[in-house]
Image (spheres, rainbow, N blue to C red):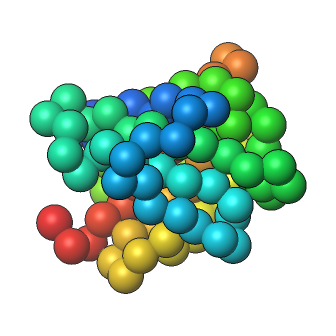
Amino acid sequence: MPKLNLRYHHLGIPTAQPIPGENYFPELKFYHCGYETSEFGIEWMRYEEGCPLPEIVQKLPHVAFQVDDVTEAIKGRHVIIPPNSPSPGVVVAVIEENGAPIELIQDSND
């Protein structure tokens, strides 16, 4: 596999506790907050019963990296969340690497 040009984006940490300022994604049944205000890029994520995301994403912290091309970055890797667009100009996918979830983000807004 070719070496990727990875740039740290954020660290996502699952929590069971509500956090003030959470944003809710009803289609995925989860809340998130913190990334926008954390100078270290820490995002807190809280999942509801019935969340369709893989259990590994709901249970383990993940690190996210910005990449030039998500489609190229996931080639030959164990994809657990296929490429999708959570907001305009942004494409994300999640892979599993040695038992850990890793989010890859392509952001054309930068």
Q: Is residue 47 something one can see in this rendering?
A: yes
**Would residue 109 be found to the left or right of residue 2 on screen?**
left
Q: Residue at x 63, y 32 (%)?
A: 16
**Would residue 40 be found to the left or right of residue 59 on screen?**
left
Q: Residue at x 20, y 30 (%)?
A: 40
Front residue (pair 93, 23): 23
**Would residue 104 be found to the left or right of residue 39 on screen?**
right
Q: Residue at x 37, y 82 (%)?
A: 88
- Which of the 4 image quadrants contains residue 27? bottom right
Q: Residue furthest top?
A: 98
Q: Indicate the position of residue 58 as horizontal and vertical percent values.
A: 69, 37
Front residue (pair 11, 50): 50
Q: Quadrant of the N terminus?
A: top right
- Residue 29 lies, with reference to residue 89, above or below; the image says above
Q: Indicate the position of residue 17 as horizontal and vertical percent values.
A: 56, 33
Q: Indicate the position of residue 96 as horizontal and vertical percent values.
A: 67, 33
